[in-house]
Image (cartoon, rainbow, N blue to C red):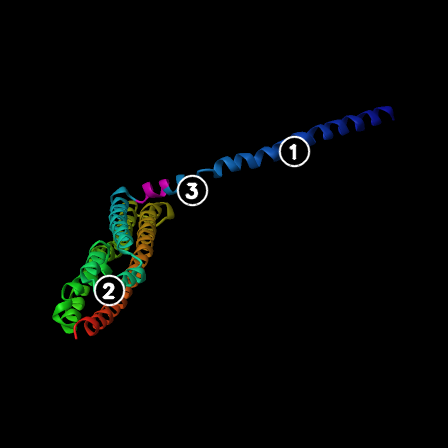
Amino acid sequence: MKKLFAMLALMGVLTLGSVPVMAQEATEAPAETTVVEEGGIHKNIKTKYIEGDASFMSLVSIALVIGLAFCIERIIYLSLAEVNAKKLMEKIEGALEKGDVEGAKTIARNTRGPVASICYQGLMRIDEGVDVVERSVVSFGGVQAGYLEKGCSWITLFIAMSPSLGFLGTVIGMVMAFDDIQAAGDISPTVVAGGMKVALITTIFGIVAALILQIFYNYILSKIEALTANMEESSISLLDMIMKYNLKYKK
């Protein structure tokens, strides 16, 4: 009987002694998974980029970088072209109400942006009549609109090129898969996997590059539309101001 109690006590000690060990292993396991997960996304992207065949992945990357360069250039240009059109027109109107045409020209000339340029062109022909001013404003407005849209065609080109290059990699990856099948004489997953992986990875990266460029392109279009609306509104306001000036000072 005493031997039985001794054996039970020994088993209890062993069981209790194993609990901390198991708890310690349980607490250490999440730490190991956390270490694996840290930086895993960047490592996976790098690995997939290399697996996608450097030749085609490089072409997609070049299209993305050049497209982003055009996007950044347009965003900077359009941001610098934005002015407070309402305050500008109020200053010009105040100068014209005083009969100070040269002061109005100076205000327009010293202000950046297409709105000020259009106003300056109209004020330069204020003595030639409202019809001449209107034609000048409309013509110069078209020129300024062309400057705003400059380079946008290149952005659309790279938006179209990125997925096209990805699809080209897809087609070539499929050809590689069939070449491997022909060489091996067997249609097994291991034989086809290499070419299929290249095909799918290049397609994914091409579509992602096109989506990134499309987001920037839509943002650029929204800024162009806002500037064009300000140009049209300011042109109408300028014609009204010139008509009032002519009625007041050229009777």
Looking at the image, which residue sits at the far left? 128
Distance from Cα at disc 3 to Cα at disc 1: 30 Å
Image coordinates of residue 44 in percent, x first then y, are 40, 41
Looking at the image, which residue sits at the far right? 1
Could you say which is closer to the camera, residue 150 or residue 179?
A: 150
Q: Indicate the secondary structure of the residue bearing disc 2.
A: loop
Can see residue 97? Answer: yes
Q: Depth-wise, is mark 3 or mark 1 nearer the camera?
A: 3
The 10 Å Cα crowd at callout 3, few under 14, some 14 to 19, many 20 or more, is few
Q: Which residue is mark 1?
A: 23
Cβ–Cβ under 8 Å for marks 2 and 3: no
Can see residue 168? Answer: no
Seen in the image, is 96 located left or right of residue 33?
left
Q: Which residue is mark 2?
A: 98
Check residue 157 in the rendering and tell me which mark sits there, or answer none: none
Could you say which is closer to the camera, residue 42 or residue 146?
A: 146
Seen in the image, is 7 located left or right of residue 25?
right
Seen in the image, is 145 located left or right of residue 51?
left
Secondary structure that dominates the magenta span? helix
- Above or below 152: residue 44: above
- Above or below 95: residue 73: above
- Above or below 234: residue 171: above
Q: Indicate the secondary structure of the residue bearing disc 1.
A: helix
Check residue 41 in the rendering and tell me which mark sits there, or answer none: 3
The 10 Å Cα crowd at callout 1, few under 14, some 14 to 19, many 20 or more, is few
Q: Which quadrant does the N terminus fall into? A: top right
Q: Earlier in the sequence, mark 2 or mark 1?
A: 1
Give the residues drawn in magenta, as a range: 46-52
Distance from Cα at disc 2 to Cα at disc 3: 66 Å
The 10 Å Cα crowd at callout 2, few under 14, some 14 to 19, many 20 or more, is few
